[in-house]
Image (tube, grey):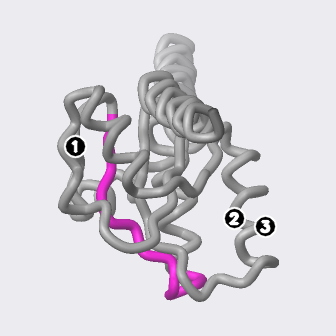
Amino acid sequence: MANEKVLAKKQDVVNEISKNVKESQSVVFFEYSDLSVVELTELRRTLRENDAEFKVYKNTLAKRALNDLEIDLNEHLVGPKAMAFGKDAVAPIKVLSDFSKKYKSLEMKVGIVEGKITTIDTLNELAKIPSREGLLTQVASGLMGVVRDLSICLDLHSQNLEN
């Protein structure tokens, strides 16, 4: 009876991991050893502000959930790992990358971005992409430049017509 309860709880965790991976645009596996409780709390808060979260699961349960989803990351799930889940494909990667620069004991290992296994090199490249707000600012600034140039041209043209 007690064994059935334990198995049911483990299956619930496997289902939770599967659900989180399916619903996330990106999942990043990272090592967090030697981070203090205050630093982990800061990381959780920063991730939450960016529509992401992180959880720590037993590797055996994570492997089972990923195998059910036909994702093979068994070689990467050795030692203590945490998983960051994000609704935005880049936001959790950027947060973890910035955090790892501040705290050297956090190290990204591998990720799943839009359903594809992503190496650490690709994660580092994705971390360099400006945020959504930054990209929108760049587009707006580019559009304003076009409008400004058009107004200057029209002004010069109207001055030539007057002469």
- Residue type, mark 2 in image: Leu
Q: Residue at left 18%, top 43%?
A: 72
Q: Residue at left 54%, top 14%?
A: 158
- Residue type, mark 3 in image: Thr
Q: Position of residue 35 (x, y in %)?
A: 64, 83
Q: Which one is in front, 122 or 9?
A: 9
SS at mark 3?
Answer: helix
Which residue is tagged 1?
Answer: 117
Mark before the other along the chain sequence, 1 or 3: 3
Q: Quadrant of residue 29?
A: bottom left
Q: Position of residue 155 (x, y in %)?
A: 57, 22
Mark before the other along the chain sequence, 2 or 1: 2
Q: Decide if residue 149 is in sight here.
A: no
Packing grade of label 2 (10 A; few <14, some 14-19, many >=20) is some
What is the magenta range?
102-113
The answer to whether marks 2 and 1 mark residues whose Cβ atoms lie closer than 8 Å is no
Q: Which mark is residue 141?
A: none
Q: Is residue 31 shown left or right of residue 102?
A: left
Q: CA distance from mark 2 to mark 1?
A: 23 Å
Q: Is residue 122 shown left or right of residue 25?
A: left
SS at mark 1?
Answer: strand
Q: Quadrant of the N terminus?
A: top right
Q: Which mark is residue 43?
A: 2
- Residue most extreme to the front: 1
Which residue is tagged 3?
Answer: 41
- Residue type, mark 1 in image: Ile
